[in-house]
Image (cartoon, rainbow, N blue to C red):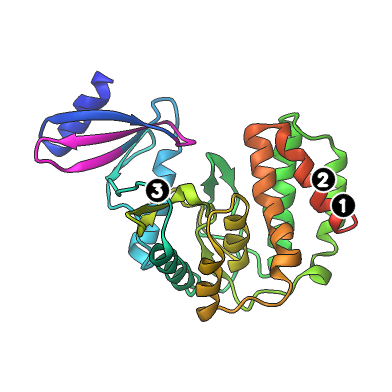
């Protein structure tokens, strides 16, 4: 802790007056800091890791290339990330949900000519491959479902029959869902813990897992842990109407990926949900 304190004091050229450990964070330890001048910061520190620099690159991209509210970045290296503290004291109210829906709809207007990203990213601290693909279903099958299923199987949390079932589902994707109109920039890890609010108003988004994909990936993920009320989705659809059967079918289809991520991160507790979705689609 003394090493971290000294390092941050050198970066900002002033003393640290307070250091509080925060909960959460899949990469390293998270701290709220207060400098002598009263400025509040958040630091993520992982002395044995090499991923915080990549998280910093994602935040820097969002800050420079989009209008999404993310913490201002003060320092990023492989083992240390220092950024602006965003107030957060609970779930969003109605106005905050409207602000979040508007922000997400605006993010999804950032387009690309292909699916993927200019560099591989992270989700929950796990490697997320972003090799460019011209076809959404190819990208989703290979670089989301297939890749993460392999990771979960290699970790010993699922047996190899799940890989066969996912391959079967991959062949049916075009029959289940429509192609998106174009590749859109997505947050990639959209749940309530990564959407911050203060007194019911939106203060910003954290922990991105960005790539150019299908906007419905964000919308589906947000339902996984009941992050928003129906008002959020109604507001989003004022700008980007969802095609029919999204909530009935494609929520499950696109939540298969974050569920595989959760299997890889947390083990067998989420395998039942993976099995349920595969059975739903006859796989």
Identified at 53% across, 58% down, the residue is 228
Within-10-Å neighbours for mark 3: few <14, some 14–19, many 20+: some
User: Residue 49's x, y, as percent?
Assistant: 45, 30
User: Residue 202's x, y, as percent?
Assistant: 36, 59
Are the residues at dot 2 and dot 1 in contact (C-beta closer than 8 Å)? yes
Identified at 16% across, 31% down, the residue is 9
Residue at the extreme right: 282
User: Residue 138's x, y, as percent?
Assistant: 73, 63
The kind of secondary structure element at disc 1 is helix
Residue interval drawn in magenta = 24-42
Label 3, label 2: how far apart the Cα atoms are: 33 Å
User: Residue 192's x, y, as percent?
Assistant: 49, 51
Considering only vertical position in the picture, is 193 above or below 250? above
Considering only vertical position in the picture, is 242 above or below 16? below
Residue, disc 3:
90
**In terms of sequence position, does the residue under pointer 1 or pointer 3 come before the other?**
3
Quadrant of residue 200 in the image? bottom left
Residue, disc 1:
279
Which one is nearer the viewer's eye here, 121 or 198?
A: 198
Label 1, label 3: how far apart the Cα atoms are: 36 Å
Report if residue 266 is visible in the image: yes
Which one is nearer the viewer's eye here, 47 or 159?
A: 159
Within-10-Å neighbours for mark 2: few <14, some 14–19, many 20+: some
Report if residue 214 is visible in the image: no
Q: Which mark, by number, is residue 275?
A: 2
Within-10-Å neighbours for mark 1: few <14, some 14–19, many 20+: few
The kind of secondary structure element at disc 2 is helix
């Amino acid at each position: 802790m003394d090493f971290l304190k000294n390092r941050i004091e050198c970066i900002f050229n002033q003393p640290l007056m307070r250091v509080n450990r925060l909960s959460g964070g899949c990469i390293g330890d998270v701290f709220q800091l207060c400098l002598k001048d009263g400025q509040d910061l958040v630091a993520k520190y992982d002395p044995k890791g090499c991923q915080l620099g990549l998280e910093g690159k994602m935040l820097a991209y969002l800050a420079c290339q989009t209008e999404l509210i993310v913490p201002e970045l003060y320092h990023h290296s492989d083992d240390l990330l220092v950024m602006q503290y965003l107030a957060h004291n609970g779930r969003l109210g109605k106005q905050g949900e409207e602000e979040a829906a508007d922000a997400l709809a605006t993010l999804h207007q950032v387009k690309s000519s292909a699916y993927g990203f200019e560099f591989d990213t992270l989700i929950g601290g796990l490697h997320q491959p972003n090799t460019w693909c011209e076809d959404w279903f190819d990208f989703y099958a290979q670089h989301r479902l297939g890749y993460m299923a392999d990771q979960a199987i290699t970790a010993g949390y699922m047996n190899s029959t799940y890989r066969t079932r996912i391959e079967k589902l991959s062949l049916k994707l075009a029959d289940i869902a429509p192609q998106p109109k174009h590749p859109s920039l997505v947050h990639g890890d959209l749940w309530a813990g990564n959407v911050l609010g203060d007194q019911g108003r939106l203060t910003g988004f954290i922990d991105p897992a960005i790539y150019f994909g299908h906007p419905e990936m964000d919308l589906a993920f947000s339902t996984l842990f009941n992050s928003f009320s129906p008002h959020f989705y109604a507001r989003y659809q004022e700008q980007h109407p969802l095609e029919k059967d999204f909530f009935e079918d494609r929520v499950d289809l696109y939540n298969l990926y974050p569920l595989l991520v959760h299997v890889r991160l947390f083990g067998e507790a989420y395998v039942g949900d993976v099995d349920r979705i595969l059975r739903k689609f006859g796989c």
